[in-house]
Amino acid sequence: MLRRLFPLCMAFVSSVMPVVGSTAMSNDFEKNEEVRQILRKQGDDSRTARVVQHYAYFQTSEARDLYRDFLFARGYKVDRESHQDPYFNPWGIVFSKVQVPNDIDVETEELDINAAKFGGEYDGWESGIVRSP
């Protein structure tokens, strides 16, 4: 879905492919590592905590609401929600939490699995650059 509902800011980098299927963890790791490599090339210290924004999309507002409850229980803040027809999963949610990019793999797997559980798709994350000292 490539964050179709929420434009990507030029100061951010992001993962760009949704993760589905039984290989979610390996796909999550590969996509996360691609983002971390892009961050590092720009001088980022991926070991440093910062606000990380995530994206997910759902078929219904009810499914998005259930996912929102899951997010709140995990300590996430909802940044924005939207609805845009005629997309397959038109109900979008952007959410964030202070996280360390190097330690994000298990968490993105959980985000992906639970989005699928509610009939949606997790579309990845983005982060500002935190330069190494």
Image (tube, rainbow, N blue to C red):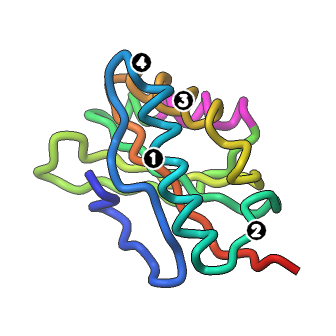
Q: Secondary structure at mark 3?
A: helix
Between the C-alphas of marks 4 and 1, the distance is 21 Å
Camera-nearest label, 4 or 2: 2
Describe the element under mark 2 as helix, strand or loop: loop
Q: Which residues are magenta?
A: 65-74
Residue at (76, 40) in percent of width and height: 75
Dot 3: within a 10 Å radius of its alpha carbon, few (fewer than 14), some, or many (20 or more) residues? many
Indicate the amino acid at tag 3.
Glu
Q: CA distance from mark 1 to mark 3?
A: 11 Å
* In this picture, residue 122 sits left or right of residue 125: left
Query: Residue 63 falls in which quadrant of the image?
Result: top left
Residue 122 part of the magenta segment: no
Q: Position of residue 51 (x, y in %)?
A: 71, 62
Q: Residues within 10 Å of mark 2 (few under 14, many from 20)?
A: some
Residue beneath label 4, please?
A: 117
Q: Which residue is mark 2?
A: 45
Which is more N-terminal, label 3 or label 1?
Answer: 1
Dot 4 or dot 3: first in sequence order is: 3
Label 4 element class:
helix
Whole-percent x and y of residue 66?
50, 27
